[in-house]
Amino acid sequence: MSGTHPGFGVYVHWPFCQTICPYCDFNVHKQSPVDEAVWRQALRSELAHYAAETAGRTVSSLYFGGGTPSLMAPATVATLIDDVAALWPTAPDIEITLETNPTSSEREQLGDLRAAGINRVSVGVQSLDDEALKFLGRDHSASDALQSLERAQAIFPRTTFDLIYARPGQTLEAWQRELEMALGYAGGHISLYQLTIEQGTPFFREGLKPADEDSAADMFEATQDTLAAAGYAAYEVSNHARPGDESRHNLTCWRGGDYLGIGPGAHGRLTLDGKFFGTHQIHNPTRWLDLTGSNGHGTAKRRLLSTEDRARELLMMGLRLAEGVDKARLLAITGLSLEQMINPEARDRLINGEMLIEDETRLYATADGRQRLNAVLGSLLN
Ligand SMILES: C[S@@+](CC[C@H](N)C(=O)[O-])C[C@H]1O[C@@H](n2cnc3c(N)ncnc32)[C@H](O)[C@@H]1O
């Protein structure tokens, strides 16, 4: 992918997990016996369905997310990768990522997943503190996580891992120690998320609160400093990478590129005949499977986005990135200028408050602005 061209991505959702984490509100379901051959066939038919509409486009990234896609048989992963290569031209440096949990059984699959064609793994470490892992409802220990990271790094050209911080009662000092330790095991990329308590999750029902706002802000700042000093630029609110090691798939989404969402609950963004659509597959896995079996795809909704919707989305996604939003590109894609989309007084106030920076070509958020991005967007967007 050259420059800031957004690329074209394919996302495949595997909705099953061995255990459901009490903080997670993704489309996840406990793994009861899954008829993998039937699931594989359904995912293949959705790929073929969307390929018919996007023939000839070059796929720059394929991302297996979940849920826990490392529970898929490597043969299923291999079939889906082979299908993508047969259905579309693929970039010579195509990024093929799979999310994995750090349990011993999944560790044993890593070699076969590499042979299947995966070239980047994202390990759900979440914490390097056994107490915290128990609190987060994880089914692995810190030592499991470190063993999985070491094994993943021996096998895959690119690795990344996720940690969750700003947990209830977590101190800045404890987080800094955990982060330093994690850095010792890092490849080229790390995702560091502040815990959010999402409606409908067990944590929400228990009335849990994350760390208070001030300590979360201190932890965010310490995170930015520690990672920058170690050579990992904060290229997005929660994502840090050495130069060139950014997640290409996620960059496609944040830069407002097209991506297909395959599998239950997956979202996609698609430009067809100059029109821009949001797609959403049926959320419920059983219903998705049934409909895909009979219709070849389980699309619940395909919504035509107005140019205003598109411009808002480009701003909301683009300001997550340190590179921000390219004003000429916004205009070229939507026909709307930055001036038409924002409140100029709020923009000036946010620039004076060092939350935003605007130059000839771009509007971008400072680290302070990215930390308070929802508030920034709330006052900025008309
Ligand atoms: C779909 S999950 C990863 C999949 C993998 N099965 C796992 O559990 O590690 C994607 C990531 O989102 C993050 N995440 C999910 N829910 C979160 C929450 N409520 N607060 C903060 N981070 C969250 C976690 O770090 C998680 O690794």
Image (cartoon, helix red, strand yellow):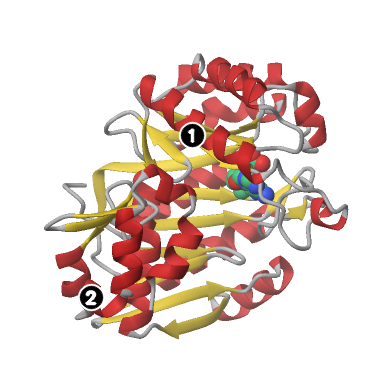
x and y, in percent, of residue 362 in the image: 20, 57
Determine the residue positioned at 61% across, 17% down: 177
Total marks in image: 2
Q: Which mark is residue 221?
A: 1
In front here: 198 or 377?
377
Residue 268 as seen in the image, left or right of residue 335: right
Amino acid type at circle 2 is Glu
User: Which quadrant would residue 230 be assigned to in this image?
Assistant: top left
x and y, in percent, of residue 381 in the image: 39, 73
**Counting residues from the N terminus, which is met first, the one under dot 2 or under dot 1?**
1
Circle 1 — which element? Answer: helix
For mark 2, what is the residue? 339
**Residue 176, placed above or below residue 121:** above
Name the quarter where the C terminus is drawn: bottom left
Q: Which mark is residue 276?
A: none
Q: CA distance from mark 2 to mark 1?
A: 31 Å
